Amino acid sequence: MLKYVAEATANQKLGAIVKPEISKQLILPPELKDLFKKDEELKKDFAKLPDCKQREYGEYIIEAKKESTKQRRLEKIIPLIKKGVGLNDHYRKT
């Protein structure tokens, strides 16, 4: 443990900033891709969202196990995407 503290102290004295690498890839489920093929305007609205919000929507659909749940979730997110808001924006403080 002392070794890590010493390394951190040395990095701080040198002014080095160590940032973690974030490499989450955007994985779009087939259901969402099919929806974009049917609705080009929705695809454009989705593309305007930041990567983190796009991943949020993709993961939300992928996490559903039943097809009926996936369809319900797709119906829920369509108006949110068109508004340009993230799935969990209503929980975030402004």
Image: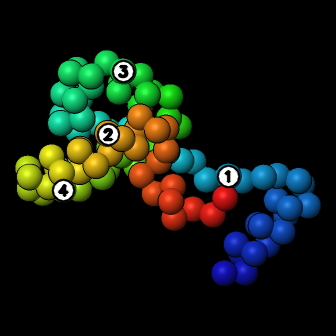
**Residue on which the image places disc 1:** 19
Mark linked to residue 78: 2
Give x and y (percent) for residue 56: 40, 49
**Earlier-in-chain disc, 1 versus 4:** 1
**Residue on which the image places disc 4:** 64
The span from disc 4 to disc 2 (Cα, nearest Å) is 16 Å
Q: Are marks 2 and 1 in contact (CB under 8 Å)?
A: no
**Residue on which the image places disc 3:** 41
The span from disc 4 to disc 3 (Cα, nearest Å) is 25 Å
Q: Is residue 16 left or right of residue 22?
A: right
Foreground disc of the pair 2, 1 = 2
Residue shown at 50% from the left, 28% from the top: 48
The span from disc 2 to disc 1 (Cα, nearest Å) is 35 Å
Foreground disc of the pair 4, 3 = 3
- Which residue type does callout 4 highlight? Ala
**Secondary structure at numbered mark 2:** helix
**Earlier-in-chain disc, 1 versus 3:** 1
Give x and y (percent) for residue 40: 31, 18
